[in-house]
Image: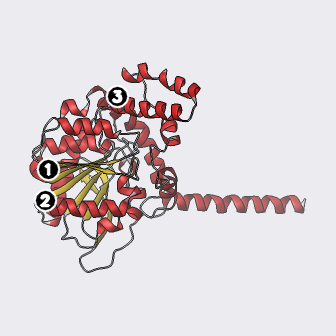
Amino acid sequence: MKSKRKRSTIFKGGMLVFAMAAAGALLRPTWTPGIAGPESISELKSVNINGTEQEILIRGTDRRNPILLMVHGGPGSSLIPIARPYQSELEKSFTIVDYDQRGTGKSYHPLEDYSDLTTNQLVADLLTLTDMLTREFGQPKVLLAGHSFGTYIGMKAAAAAPDKFYAYIGISQISDLVRSDMDSLAYLIGQAEQDGDESEAARLRTLAKAISKGKTELSMSLIRNAGGAARQIDDQLDYAEGFLWSPEYNLLDGVRAYLGHRVSNRRLLDEAAAHPLPDLVKQVKLPVFFAMGQHDLITSVPAALHYFNQLKAPRKVFMVFKKSAHYPQLEENVRFAEWMNEVWASLR
Protein backbone atom coordinates (compact mmCIF):
# COMPACT_ATOMS: atom_id res chain seq x y z
CA MET A 1 0.00 0.00 0.00
CA LYS A 2 2.79 2.42 0.94
CA SER A 3 4.54 1.62 -2.35
CA LYS A 4 1.37 2.44 -4.32
CA ARG A 5 0.92 5.70 -2.43
CA LYS A 6 4.56 6.59 -3.07
CA ARG A 7 4.20 5.88 -6.79
CA SER A 8 1.00 7.94 -6.87
CA THR A 9 2.73 10.84 -5.14
CA ILE A 10 5.65 10.69 -7.58
CA PHE A 11 3.24 10.57 -10.54
CA LYS A 12 1.25 13.55 -9.28
CA GLY A 13 4.46 15.44 -8.62
CA GLY A 14 5.69 14.68 -12.12
CA MET A 15 2.40 15.79 -13.64
CA LEU A 16 2.55 19.02 -11.63
CA VAL A 17 6.08 19.74 -12.86
CA PHE A 18 5.02 18.99 -16.44
CA ALA A 19 1.95 21.25 -16.12
CA MET A 20 4.06 24.07 -14.70
CA ALA A 21 6.63 23.69 -17.50
CA ALA A 22 3.89 23.64 -20.13
CA ALA A 23 2.26 26.74 -18.61
CA GLY A 24 5.65 28.46 -18.55
CA ALA A 25 6.25 27.69 -22.23
CA LEU A 26 2.76 28.85 -23.14
CA LEU A 27 2.76 32.09 -21.20
CA ARG A 28 6.39 33.17 -20.80
CA PRO A 29 6.92 36.87 -21.54
CA THR A 30 8.17 37.66 -25.03
CA TRP A 31 10.90 40.15 -25.88
CA THR A 32 13.66 40.79 -28.40
CA PRO A 33 17.39 40.93 -27.63
CA GLY A 34 19.00 44.33 -27.38
CA ILE A 35 21.46 45.81 -29.87
CA ALA A 36 24.55 47.71 -28.70
CA GLY A 37 24.84 51.39 -29.56
CA PRO A 38 23.39 54.72 -28.39
CA GLU A 39 21.06 55.05 -31.41
CA SER A 40 20.09 51.39 -31.68
CA ILE A 41 16.52 50.17 -31.43
CA SER A 42 15.14 46.74 -30.52
CA GLU A 43 11.43 46.71 -29.76
CA LEU A 44 8.68 44.12 -29.79
CA LYS A 45 5.33 45.75 -29.20
CA SER A 46 1.65 45.72 -29.99
CA VAL A 47 0.07 48.70 -31.72
CA ASN A 48 -3.49 49.46 -32.75
CA ILE A 49 -3.83 49.50 -36.53
CA ASN A 50 -7.26 50.29 -37.91
CA GLY A 51 -9.06 48.95 -34.87
CA THR A 52 -7.11 45.79 -34.06
CA GLU A 53 -3.91 45.10 -32.12
CA GLN A 54 -1.03 44.03 -34.34
CA GLU A 55 2.47 42.99 -33.28
CA ILE A 56 5.54 44.72 -34.70
CA LEU A 57 9.24 43.96 -34.30
CA ILE A 58 11.66 46.86 -34.88
CA ARG A 59 15.42 46.30 -34.92
CA GLY A 60 18.43 48.24 -36.09
CA THR A 61 21.83 49.54 -35.00
CA ASP A 62 20.88 53.16 -35.75
CA ARG A 63 17.30 54.39 -35.73
CA ARG A 64 18.34 57.15 -38.15
CA ASN A 65 18.94 54.55 -40.87
CA PRO A 66 16.28 54.10 -43.57
CA ILE A 67 13.28 52.00 -42.57
CA LEU A 68 12.88 48.66 -44.32
CA LEU A 69 9.30 47.47 -43.82
CA MET A 70 8.92 43.71 -44.41
CA VAL A 71 5.52 42.25 -45.39
CA HIS A 72 5.35 38.53 -44.62
CA GLY A 73 3.70 35.94 -46.81
CA GLY A 74 1.80 32.72 -46.30
CA PRO A 75 -0.84 34.02 -46.21
CA GLY A 76 -0.72 33.89 -42.45
CA SER A 77 2.97 33.01 -42.03
CA SER A 78 4.74 35.43 -39.70
CA LEU A 79 8.44 36.10 -40.18
CA ILE A 80 8.94 37.28 -36.60
CA PRO A 81 9.78 33.82 -35.14
CA ILE A 82 12.53 33.17 -37.69
CA ALA A 83 13.76 36.46 -39.19
CA ARG A 84 16.02 37.92 -36.50
CA PRO A 85 18.87 35.34 -36.66
CA TYR A 86 19.21 36.05 -40.40
CA GLN A 87 18.97 39.84 -40.47
CA SER A 88 21.91 41.06 -38.39
CA GLU A 89 23.71 42.30 -41.52
CA LEU A 90 20.61 44.19 -42.65
CA GLU A 91 20.27 45.73 -39.19
CA LYS A 92 23.60 47.50 -39.67
CA SER A 93 22.25 49.63 -42.51
CA PHE A 94 18.47 49.63 -42.06
CA THR A 95 15.87 49.82 -39.34
CA ILE A 96 14.03 46.56 -40.00
CA VAL A 97 10.31 46.37 -39.25
CA ASP A 98 8.62 42.97 -39.29
CA TYR A 99 4.97 42.76 -38.31
CA ASP A 100 2.29 40.12 -37.91
CA GLN A 101 -0.56 41.01 -40.24
CA ARG A 102 -4.14 41.13 -39.06
CA GLY A 103 -5.18 37.61 -38.06
CA THR A 104 -1.63 36.22 -38.16
CA GLY A 105 0.49 34.94 -35.27
CA LYS A 106 0.63 37.38 -32.38
CA SER A 107 -1.92 39.55 -34.24
CA TYR A 108 -4.53 36.78 -34.18
CA HIS A 109 -7.22 37.31 -31.55
CA PRO A 110 -9.69 34.42 -31.05
CA LEU A 111 -12.68 36.66 -30.32
CA GLU A 112 -12.27 38.77 -33.47
CA ASP A 113 -14.23 38.09 -36.64
CA TYR A 114 -12.04 37.45 -39.70
CA SER A 115 -14.83 36.26 -41.99
CA ASP A 116 -14.53 39.35 -44.19
CA LEU A 117 -10.70 39.47 -44.27
CA THR A 118 -9.42 40.59 -47.68
CA THR A 119 -6.12 41.72 -49.14
CA ASN A 120 -7.59 45.24 -49.41
CA GLN A 121 -7.90 45.30 -45.62
CA LEU A 122 -4.30 44.14 -45.28
CA VAL A 123 -3.21 46.86 -47.71
CA ALA A 124 -5.06 49.47 -45.65
CA ASP A 125 -3.33 48.19 -42.49
CA LEU A 126 0.05 48.34 -44.23
CA LEU A 127 -0.47 51.94 -45.32
CA THR A 128 -1.54 52.94 -41.80
CA LEU A 129 1.52 51.24 -40.31
CA THR A 130 3.72 53.05 -42.83
CA ASP A 131 2.34 56.41 -41.69
CA MET A 132 2.92 55.45 -38.06
CA LEU A 133 6.55 54.57 -38.76
CA THR A 134 7.37 57.71 -40.73
CA ARG A 135 5.93 59.81 -37.90
CA GLU A 136 7.74 57.87 -35.18
CA PHE A 137 11.14 58.00 -36.89
CA GLY A 138 10.78 61.40 -38.54
CA GLN A 139 11.46 60.03 -42.01
CA PRO A 140 9.58 60.99 -45.18
CA LYS A 141 9.27 57.48 -46.65
CA VAL A 142 10.14 53.84 -46.11
CA LEU A 143 11.54 51.05 -48.24
CA LEU A 144 8.77 48.51 -48.80
CA ALA A 145 9.64 44.82 -49.15
CA GLY A 146 7.21 41.95 -49.50
CA HIS A 147 7.99 38.24 -49.35
CA SER A 148 5.97 35.61 -51.23
CA PHE A 149 2.26 36.32 -50.65
CA GLY A 150 3.37 39.53 -48.96
CA THR A 151 4.32 40.74 -52.44
CA TYR A 152 0.64 40.59 -53.44
CA ILE A 153 -0.16 42.98 -50.59
CA GLY A 154 3.01 45.04 -51.02
CA MET A 155 2.57 45.55 -54.75
CA LYS A 156 -1.03 46.70 -54.28
CA ALA A 157 0.12 49.12 -51.57
CA ALA A 158 2.94 50.47 -53.76
CA ALA A 159 0.50 51.09 -56.60
CA ALA A 160 -2.04 52.74 -54.30
CA ALA A 161 0.35 55.09 -52.47
CA PRO A 162 3.72 55.37 -54.25
CA ASP A 163 4.49 58.63 -52.43
CA LYS A 164 4.90 56.72 -49.15
CA PHE A 165 7.77 54.53 -50.40
CA TYR A 166 11.28 55.04 -51.75
CA ALA A 167 11.00 51.78 -53.70
CA TYR A 168 9.29 48.42 -53.75
CA ILE A 169 11.27 45.18 -53.31
CA GLY A 170 9.44 41.97 -54.24
CA ILE A 171 11.20 38.97 -52.66
CA SER A 172 9.95 35.71 -54.21
CA GLN A 173 7.51 37.84 -56.13
CA ILE A 174 4.06 36.41 -56.67
CA SER A 175 2.57 36.71 -60.15
CA ASP A 176 -0.06 34.52 -61.77
CA LEU A 177 -0.43 31.52 -59.44
CA VAL A 178 -1.50 29.17 -62.22
CA ARG A 179 1.39 30.17 -64.50
CA SER A 180 3.83 29.72 -61.62
CA ASP A 181 2.51 26.24 -60.77
CA MET A 182 2.66 25.22 -64.43
CA ASP A 183 6.30 26.37 -64.59
CA SER A 184 7.14 24.34 -61.51
CA LEU A 185 5.25 21.30 -62.78
CA ALA A 186 7.22 21.41 -66.04
CA TYR A 187 10.44 21.52 -64.02
CA LEU A 188 9.39 18.51 -61.92
CA ILE A 189 8.43 16.51 -65.00
CA GLY A 190 11.80 17.34 -66.58
CA GLN A 191 13.62 16.21 -63.44
CA ALA A 192 11.72 12.92 -63.35
CA GLU A 193 12.55 12.30 -67.01
CA GLN A 194 16.19 13.16 -66.39
CA ASP A 195 16.26 10.66 -63.52
CA GLY A 196 14.74 8.00 -65.75
CA ASP A 197 11.60 7.79 -63.62
CA GLU A 198 8.99 7.65 -66.39
CA SER A 199 6.22 6.49 -64.06
CA GLU A 200 6.66 9.60 -61.90
CA ALA A 201 6.84 11.80 -64.99
CA ALA A 202 3.59 10.25 -66.26
CA ARG A 203 1.92 10.76 -62.89
CA LEU A 204 2.95 14.41 -62.84
CA ARG A 205 1.62 14.93 -66.36
CA THR A 206 -1.83 13.88 -65.16
CA LEU A 207 -1.86 16.96 -62.89
CA ALA A 208 -1.39 19.42 -65.75
CA LYS A 209 -5.03 19.81 -66.78
CA ALA A 210 -6.33 20.51 -63.27
CA ILE A 211 -3.47 22.89 -62.46
CA SER A 212 -3.85 24.80 -65.74
CA LYS A 213 -7.52 25.40 -64.92
CA GLY A 214 -6.73 26.48 -61.36
CA LYS A 215 -8.57 23.53 -59.85
CA THR A 216 -5.61 22.20 -57.89
CA GLU A 217 -2.12 23.23 -56.82
CA LEU A 218 1.24 21.54 -56.59
CA SER A 219 1.64 19.91 -53.19
CA MET A 220 4.21 21.36 -50.84
CA SER A 221 5.65 17.88 -50.32
CA LEU A 222 6.51 17.69 -54.03
CA ILE A 223 8.05 21.14 -53.93
CA ARG A 224 10.06 20.45 -50.78
CA ASN A 225 11.33 17.11 -52.00
CA ALA A 226 12.64 18.82 -55.14
CA GLY A 227 14.44 21.52 -53.13
CA GLY A 228 12.02 24.18 -54.34
CA ALA A 229 11.15 25.62 -50.90
CA ALA A 230 14.55 26.11 -49.25
CA ARG A 231 18.08 24.90 -49.99
CA GLN A 232 20.44 26.72 -47.64
CA ILE A 233 18.21 26.61 -44.56
CA ASP A 234 15.66 24.26 -43.04
CA ASP A 235 12.65 26.56 -42.95
CA GLN A 236 10.38 24.01 -41.27
CA LEU A 237 12.89 23.41 -38.47
CA ASP A 238 13.42 27.17 -38.13
CA TYR A 239 9.70 27.70 -37.64
CA ALA A 240 9.42 24.83 -35.16
CA GLU A 241 12.34 26.17 -33.13
CA GLY A 242 11.05 29.73 -33.49
CA PHE A 243 7.67 28.84 -32.05
CA LEU A 244 9.30 26.90 -29.21
CA TRP A 245 12.41 28.89 -28.32
CA SER A 246 12.40 32.31 -30.02
CA PRO A 247 12.26 35.06 -27.37
CA GLU A 248 9.82 36.92 -29.62
CA TYR A 249 7.28 34.07 -29.52
CA ASN A 250 5.96 31.77 -26.84
CA LEU A 251 4.05 28.53 -27.30
CA LEU A 252 0.70 30.30 -27.03
CA ASP A 253 1.76 32.54 -29.91
CA GLY A 254 2.54 29.38 -31.87
CA VAL A 255 -1.00 28.17 -31.24
CA ARG A 256 -2.35 31.53 -32.36
CA ALA A 257 -0.20 31.30 -35.48
CA TYR A 258 -1.72 27.92 -36.29
CA LEU A 259 -5.28 29.12 -35.75
CA GLY A 260 -4.70 32.32 -37.71
CA HIS A 261 -3.20 30.40 -40.62
CA ARG A 262 -6.31 28.24 -40.78
CA VAL A 263 -8.51 31.33 -40.85
CA SER A 264 -6.69 33.37 -43.49
CA ASN A 265 -4.61 31.13 -45.73
CA ARG A 266 -7.20 29.52 -47.99
CA ARG A 267 -9.42 32.60 -48.14
CA LEU A 268 -6.64 34.92 -49.28
CA LEU A 269 -5.07 32.41 -51.68
CA ASP A 270 -8.46 31.95 -53.34
CA GLU A 271 -8.75 35.72 -53.70
CA ALA A 272 -5.32 35.92 -55.34
CA ALA A 273 -6.14 33.03 -57.68
CA ALA A 274 -9.38 34.71 -58.73
CA HIS A 275 -7.66 38.09 -59.19
CA PRO A 276 -4.08 37.55 -60.46
CA LEU A 277 -1.72 40.34 -59.52
CA PRO A 278 -0.64 41.05 -63.13
CA ASP A 279 -4.30 41.88 -63.89
CA LEU A 280 -4.60 44.19 -60.87
CA VAL A 281 -1.30 46.09 -60.90
CA LYS A 282 0.08 46.89 -64.33
CA GLN A 283 1.93 50.08 -63.39
CA VAL A 284 3.61 51.56 -60.33
CA LYS A 285 5.10 55.02 -60.04
CA LEU A 286 8.23 54.16 -58.09
CA PRO A 287 11.36 52.01 -58.59
CA VAL A 288 10.70 48.26 -58.50
CA PHE A 289 13.18 45.50 -57.59
CA PHE A 290 12.37 41.79 -57.84
CA ALA A 291 14.59 39.40 -55.83
CA MET A 292 14.13 35.75 -56.78
CA GLY A 293 15.71 32.50 -55.68
CA GLN A 294 16.81 30.56 -58.75
CA HIS A 295 15.47 27.25 -57.42
CA ASP A 296 12.11 28.58 -56.20
CA LEU A 297 9.21 26.28 -57.12
CA ILE A 298 6.63 28.16 -55.03
CA THR A 299 6.87 31.44 -56.91
CA SER A 300 8.68 30.54 -60.11
CA VAL A 301 11.35 32.74 -61.68
CA PRO A 302 9.84 32.49 -65.21
CA ALA A 303 6.39 33.59 -64.00
CA ALA A 304 7.87 36.49 -62.02
CA LEU A 305 10.00 37.52 -65.01
CA HIS A 306 6.94 37.47 -67.28
CA TYR A 307 5.17 39.84 -64.88
CA PHE A 308 8.29 41.98 -64.51
CA ASN A 309 8.51 42.45 -68.26
CA GLN A 310 4.86 43.52 -68.44
CA LEU A 311 4.99 45.87 -65.46
CA LYS A 312 5.45 49.58 -66.11
CA ALA A 313 7.66 51.45 -63.64
CA PRO A 314 10.16 54.33 -63.82
CA ARG A 315 12.94 51.87 -62.98
CA LYS A 316 13.02 48.07 -62.79
CA VAL A 317 15.68 45.58 -61.63
CA PHE A 318 15.36 41.78 -61.69
CA MET A 319 17.81 40.02 -59.36
CA VAL A 320 18.29 36.24 -59.13
CA PHE A 321 20.03 34.67 -56.12
CA LYS A 322 21.72 31.58 -57.51
CA LYS A 323 21.87 29.43 -54.35
CA SER A 324 18.38 30.10 -53.04
CA ALA A 325 14.88 28.77 -53.40
CA HIS A 326 11.92 30.58 -51.81
CA TYR A 327 13.79 32.51 -49.08
CA PRO A 328 16.73 34.39 -50.67
CA GLN A 329 16.72 36.98 -47.87
CA LEU A 330 17.38 34.14 -45.39
CA GLU A 331 19.22 31.56 -47.49
CA GLU A 332 21.76 34.10 -48.77
CA ASN A 333 21.30 36.64 -46.01
CA VAL A 334 24.76 38.23 -46.26
CA ARG A 335 24.59 38.60 -50.04
CA PHE A 336 21.02 39.85 -49.74
CA ALA A 337 22.13 42.54 -47.28
CA GLU A 338 24.93 43.58 -49.63
CA TRP A 339 22.44 43.80 -52.48
CA MET A 340 20.01 45.86 -50.38
CA ASN A 341 22.83 48.31 -49.65
CA GLU A 342 23.40 48.54 -53.40
CA VAL A 343 19.69 49.15 -53.93
CA TRP A 344 19.63 51.93 -51.34
CA ALA A 345 22.75 53.55 -52.74
CA SER A 346 21.18 53.60 -56.21
CA LEU A 347 18.13 55.44 -54.85
CA ARG A 348 19.98 58.27 -53.12
Relative to 267, is 284 on the left or the right? left
Residue 288, image x, y percentages: 18, 48
Amino acid marked by disc 1: Pro
Find out whether the residues at labels 2 and 1 contact each other: C-beta distance under 8 Å.
Answer: yes
149 is higher (above) or lower (below) than 71: above
What residue is at 52 percent from the left and 31 percent from the top? 193
Q: Residue at x 50, y 41 (%)?
A: 226
Q: Indicate which disc, 2 or 3, sits on the residue closer to the N terminus.
A: 3
**Helix, strand or loop at mark 2:** helix
- Residue that mark 1 sits on: 287
**Left or right, 249 with reference to 46:** right
Q: Mark number for residue 120?
A: none
Q: 277 above or below 28? A: above
Relative image position of residue 326 (x, y in whole percent): 39, 47
User: Dot 3 corresponds to which residue?
Assistant: 178
**Label 2 belongs to which residue?**
347
Q: CA distance from mark 2 to mark 1?
A: 8 Å
